[in-house]
Image (spheres, helix red, strand yellow):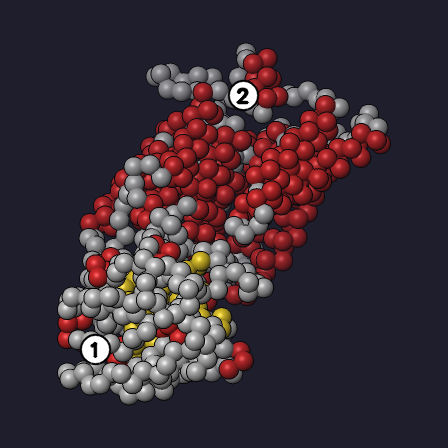
């Protein structure tokens, strides 16, 4: 009787487990959010992800992802990785890292924010959207895990402080600087004509235009005036920050307005492998266990001796 | 505190407790309750700094060691297990809430199981119910809960080790106005523990059920009633001995004391808020805190000046008290000093999962707090086994 019940319980548990695993696999697999080379993003497909590392002297990285996705998946693929807080879980983006920038080191560093509690409103990653065709940023009303970006939109993460009135902490880059302006996917094995870029809005800071083309290294520094520059996705495995600091001196022949402030450099972050993660050693845990046992044994011994002497 | 040290110097000859042991051992006596409270609160402060499960388990071990070494046989001193139950409840609630109110799962996480997902409408998308649960989520909830549990256990250790009734004697004079409230708030936890034990024993003697949910109902009501009643009785007893007495104070000076205390408390609250909120104006931080502290101190001095009392059997503050309080404070200082270790090791990352490290300086600091187990003098043994223990240990 009881054995029968036990068997039934086990069967039920196994079935439930199988179902849940199947459900999980079913929900996780077909989403199929995948990183893409930047050229695959167009004005109507793909989502551009941009992350501003200028708070730590880095560039603004931008990369591309396929669309049925969430802001969180976009930020956790193709070499991107995030860390949540101990208090809120992974959904609260506390650190962001890209394996091509400083070896995947995540910012802010543990010295700057321990990511145990929710970070203060004066220093955190704020999340901004620009829908297709829109040239203004909109502060995200949803968290990264819940927001589903539209095809052709831009997602931007900047580090800093914001206030309730919305007067502080606005992005300095415009969506036009980051958006994919090509109507057809480019890149791939044979880069086609890339001169189909839509004309930029007149008041876009186009930044410095490189006088001489950058050396044909793996990482490509693109200026917003030519966001669809031919690129080489195969060489994207090791984009490094070394190529980013092209001189940001005032450009002599800038087509943009004269206020070509030394704004953040926009650098393409091609899909890369995840940064290596070291799970560490289990020895400290074992040592602590032994220490705790030792203290416990000392306590038990002391208690016994005390009882004997009484 | 100054009053206590002064009275300790004045009353050196009479030593409470039994005659000295032969064999060169220290005199058994009870440590000053404030020393235990300083030690425990400092350790709780140190715990608040870290999320490292290894360090937290070390703190629990140290608490257990010190309590087994130095607790008395008084009724409140046998209640540490109730604080442990409370701590376990805290961890369980934290883990359950993290599992039910899903915080999402990422492809890198270790999937454990899935709860039925209850979809919420779009306009209510902020909260998710059910869904896949990862090992990382549960572990981070457990370590978070463990930290709170450790802090609870620190307070529990203070309640277990220090005599709550003698702790009341060192209250600053101005707080006598609040005699009843302070007495009830300080003694309700130890009284609760005592009441649980008494009711449980009574039930056992009547051969009633002592386990299960129905027994729980039979215990909770009498326990709550008993604990509150005993606290009130204690407060009344203290009232009759002059606690909370307005004495010779004029109406004006009483009002002045009250105003100073109220303003000071407001200043302290505003200061704490200013320090914790980074966007608050600078003036609200340390200056407000300092002004509040000065006002509070002035209020306490003013209120304490007009109350004179003599004390019978004063609690001495000697080397052992300094040592116990000092080792607790030192461990907190070491954990906050950030010297000799990487601050990131105090809060190891769960996403991605990795083994926590054991930073040496914080571990040594926590073990240092454990030296209170032999720095404190051994507690006085019950004089006669035949006498009921409650009788022998009743203070005053």
Number of other residues with Cα within 10 Å of mark 2, as a class: few under 14, some 14 to 19, many 20 or more: many
Residue B170 falls in image quadrant: top right
Front-most of residues B201 and B240? B240
Q: Which residue is the site of mark 1?
A: A230
Q: Nearer the viewer, mark 1 or mark 2?
A: 1
Q: Looking at the image, which residue is at 67% across and 38% down?
A: B264
- Chain under callout 2: B
Q: Position of residue B106 (x, y in %)?
A: 32, 72
Q: Looking at the image, which residue is at 53% across and 31% down?
A: B33
Residues under labels 1 and 2: Cα distance? 83 Å
Residue B112 falls in image quadrant: bottom left
Q: Looking at the image, which residue is at 27% across and 64% down?
A: A98
Q: Position of residue B70 (x, y in %)?
A: 42, 33
Callout 2 secondary element: loop
Q: Is residue A269 above or below residue A163?
A: below
Question: Position of A278 compared to A76: left or right?
Answer: left
Asked if residue A183 can be seen in this view, the reply is yes
In the picture, the quarter occupied by the N terminus of chain B is top right
Q: Which residue is the site of mark 2?
A: B316
Front-most of residues A30 and B49? A30
In the picture, the quarter occupied by the C terminus of chain B is top right
Residue that sits furthest to the front in the current view: A252
Asked if residue A144 can be seen in this view, the reply is no
Circles 1 and 2 on the same chain: no
Q: Position of residue B291 (x, y in %)?
A: 64, 35
Q: Looking at the image, which residue is at 34% across and 17% down?
A: B23
């Amino acid at each position: 009787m009881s054995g029968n019940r036990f068997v039934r319980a086990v069967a039920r548990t196994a079935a439930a487990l199988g179902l849940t695993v199947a459900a999980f696999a079913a929900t996780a697999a077909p989403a199929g959010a995948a990183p893409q080379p930047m050229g695959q993003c167009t004005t109507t497909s793909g989502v551009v992800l941009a992350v501003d590392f200028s708070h730590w002297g880095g560039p603004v990285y931008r990369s591309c992802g396929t669309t049925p996705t969430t802001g969180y998946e976009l930020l956790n693929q193709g070499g991107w990785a995030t860390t949540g807080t101990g208090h809120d879980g992974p959904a609260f983006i506390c650190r962001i890292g890209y394996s091509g920038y400083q070896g995947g080191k995540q910012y802010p560093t543990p010295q700057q924010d321990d990511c145990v509690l929710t970070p203060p409103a004066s220093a955190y990653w704020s999340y901004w959207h620009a829908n297709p065709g829109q040239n203004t940023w909109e502060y995200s009303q949803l968290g990264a895990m819940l927001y589903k970006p539209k095809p052709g939109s831009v997602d931007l993460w900047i580090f800093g402080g914001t206030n309730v009135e919305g007067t502080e902490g606005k992005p300095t880059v415009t969506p036009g600087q980051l958006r994919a302006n090509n109507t057809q996917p480019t890149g791939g094995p044979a880069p086609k004509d890339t001169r189909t870029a839509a004309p930029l809005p007149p008041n876009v800071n186009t930044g410095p235009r490189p006088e001489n083309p950058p050396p044909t290294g793996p990482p490509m520094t693109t200026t917003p005036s030519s966001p669809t520059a031919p690129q080489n996705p195969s060489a994207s495995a090791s984009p490094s920050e070394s190529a980013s600091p092209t001189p940001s001196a005032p450009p002599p022949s800038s087509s943009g307005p004269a206020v070509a402030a030394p704004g953040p450099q926009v650098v393409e972050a091609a899909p890369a492998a995840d940064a290596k993660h070291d799970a560490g050693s289990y020895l400290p845990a074992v040592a602590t266990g032994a220490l705790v046992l030792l203290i416990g044994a000392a306590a038990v011994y002391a208690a016994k001796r005390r009882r004997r002497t009484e | 505190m100054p009053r206590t040290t002064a009275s300790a110097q004045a009353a050196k000859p009479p030593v409470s407790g039994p005659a000295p042991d032969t064999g060169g051992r220290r005199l058994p006596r009870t440590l000053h309750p404030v020393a235990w409270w300083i030690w425990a609160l400092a350790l709780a402060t140190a715990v608040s700094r870290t999320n490292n499960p290894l360090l937290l388990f070390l703190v629990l071990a140290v608490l257990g060691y010190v309590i087994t070494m130095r607790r008395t046989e008084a009724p409140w001193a046998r209640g540490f297990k109730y604080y442990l139950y409370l701590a376990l409840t805290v961890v369980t609630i934290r883990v359950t809430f993290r599992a039910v109110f899903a915080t999402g799962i990422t492809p890198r996480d270790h999937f454990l199981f899935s709860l039925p997902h209850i979809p919420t409408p779009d306009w209510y998308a902020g909260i998710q119910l059910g869904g896949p649960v990862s090992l990382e989520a549960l572990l981070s909830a457990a370590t978070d809960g463990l930290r709170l549990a450790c802090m609870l256990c620190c307070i529990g250790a203070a309640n277990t080790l220090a005599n709550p009734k003698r702790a009341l004697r060192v209250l600053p004079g101005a707080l006598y106005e609040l005699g009843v409230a302070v007495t009830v708030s300080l003694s309700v936890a130890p009284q609760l523990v005592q009441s649980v034990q008494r009711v449980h024993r009574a039930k056992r003697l009547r051969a009633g059920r002592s386990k299960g949910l129905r027994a729980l109902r039979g215990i909770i009501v009498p326990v709550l009633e008993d604990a509150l009643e005993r606290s009130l009785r204690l407060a009344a007893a203290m009232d009759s001995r002059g606690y909370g007495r307005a004495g010779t104070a004029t109406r004006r000076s009483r009002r002045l004391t009250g105003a100073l205390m109220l303003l000071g408390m407001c200043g302290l609250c505003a200061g704490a808020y200013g320090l914790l909120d980074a966007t608050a104006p600078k003036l609200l931080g340390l200056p407000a805190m300092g002004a509040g502290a000065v006002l509070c101190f002035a209020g306490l001095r003013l209120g304490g000046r007009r109350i004179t009392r003599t004390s019978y059997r004063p609690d001495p503050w000697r080397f052992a008290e300094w040592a116990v309080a000092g080792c607790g404070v030192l461990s907190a200082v070491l954990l906050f000093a950030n010297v000799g270790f990487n601050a990131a090791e105090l809060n190891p990352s769960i996403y991605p999962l990795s083994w926590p490290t054991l930073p040496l300086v914080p571990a040594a600091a926590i073990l240092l707090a454990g030296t209170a187990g032999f720095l404190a003098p051994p507690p006085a043994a019950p004089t006669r086994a035949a006498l009921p223990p409650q009788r022998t240990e009743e203070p005053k």
